[in-house]
Amino acid sequence: MRFPAFLVLILSLTLTACGSTSPVPPTATATLISSSTATSQPTPTPTPTITPSPPTSTPTLAPVCEPFLTFCIEDGHFLLQRPIAPPNNDVIDPTYRYGTTEHGTRQPHHGVEFPNAQGTPVLAAADGKVVVAQNDKLSLIGPWTGFYGNVVVVQHKLPGFAVPIFTLYGHLFKIDVQVGQQVKAGDQLGEVGATGTAIGSHLHFEVREGSDAYTSNRNPELWLVPRLDQNGRPFGVLVGKIIDLQGNTIRVPVVIQYYPDPNGKSQAQYEVETYAPEKQPVRPDDAWDENFSLGALPAGKYRVVIVTAGRTFERWVDIQPGKVTQMTLPVN
């Protein structure tokens, strides 16, 4: 990716936000918080010692949202139902998100996981046609044969997409459908299991865009209908890209802190990996071109923190119910 030429001019402008209630820090793009000769990186449970700089300016409306300077809040394409229904676990496993490697210990993840007991019903995420229903012991559906074990793939025609969308359901204990069968959203496709390369009983779920290929993957967290918070409002999603000043994506831990009160203390903290590079790449979403994402976020204000080469950068963003917040953070 080439760093946008207009960014040099934009960075000299006063920050604006694209939402009507979106306070932002009074600096352009990444805010350099501290610098030193140290090369410390955030740990899986970091405790930053830097006092955050809460937003103090009153934003104005901008006709065009610019994620390089502040953030954008946009509609998502949440067109897929969750493949596991309550009271079973419909929460994505946060320890092995899409595009991550569990800190280098596992293959870059092309999907998401729903840990559940063997026999838990697995449901179609949308109307469609079954195009795969078999054990992949002799078929190359993933990176190698036998990867998914018992697996079902459904082809969908979703509104707003000219190309087909495919959903994949892997490691099944039992398959309940046949190739060519038409299914409706919520129909049972099979049961959760631990076949193939599964570590423990869970559903492996993928979204593929354009073709039913391992390299056509997209982040399912950006397609699944958000769950509801304790107040009955849908959670929001954060997507972002971390780049250097030449526009190249870089791999760094991303710390995301939740501040219900921007002048108070952080009430929750998350750490995510940026997407791992590999020979068969983990694909960003066509709409966001992200290299990290975090879903299931309650509405409110968040501080996104990057530590690289002993320097710390931050960006304050808003999360709104059922929306996607997009940001791009240049660091050097």
Image: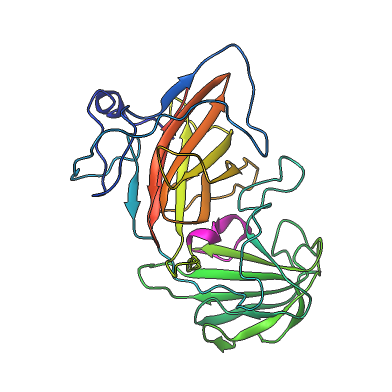
Residue name at image x 55 percent, y 58 percent: 216
Residue 245 vertical placement versus 98 (above, below): above
Magenta stretch containing residue 260, yes or no? no
Of residues 140 and 85, the one nearer the viewer is 85
Residue name at image x 47 percent, y 70 percent: 164
Residue 137 vertical placement versus 181 (above, below): above
Residue name at image x 40 percent, y 64 percent: 77
- Residue 121 is drawn in which quadrant? bottom right
Residue name at image x 48 percent, y 30 percent: 248
Q: Quadrant of the N terminus?
A: top left
In the rendered image, residue 137, in percent from the top left (x then y), is placed at: 81, 69
In the rendered image, residue 326, in percent from the top left (x then y), is placed at: 39, 47
Of residues 254 and 318, the one nearer the viewer is 318
In the rendered image, residue 19, in percent from the top left (x then y), is placed at: 26, 49
Residue furthest to the front in view is 264
Residue 92 seen in the current view: yes
Residue 28 vertical placement versus 101 (above, below): above
Report the side of 83 relative to 316 (left or right).
right
- Residue 279 is drawn in which quadrant? top right
Range of the magenta residues? Answer: 210-222
Report the side of 156 relative to 90 (left or right).
left
User: How many dots with numbers?
Assistant: 0
Of residues 108 and 147, the one nearer the viewer is 108
In the rendered image, residue 189, in percent from the top left (x then y), is placed at: 65, 83
Residue 179 seen in the current view: no
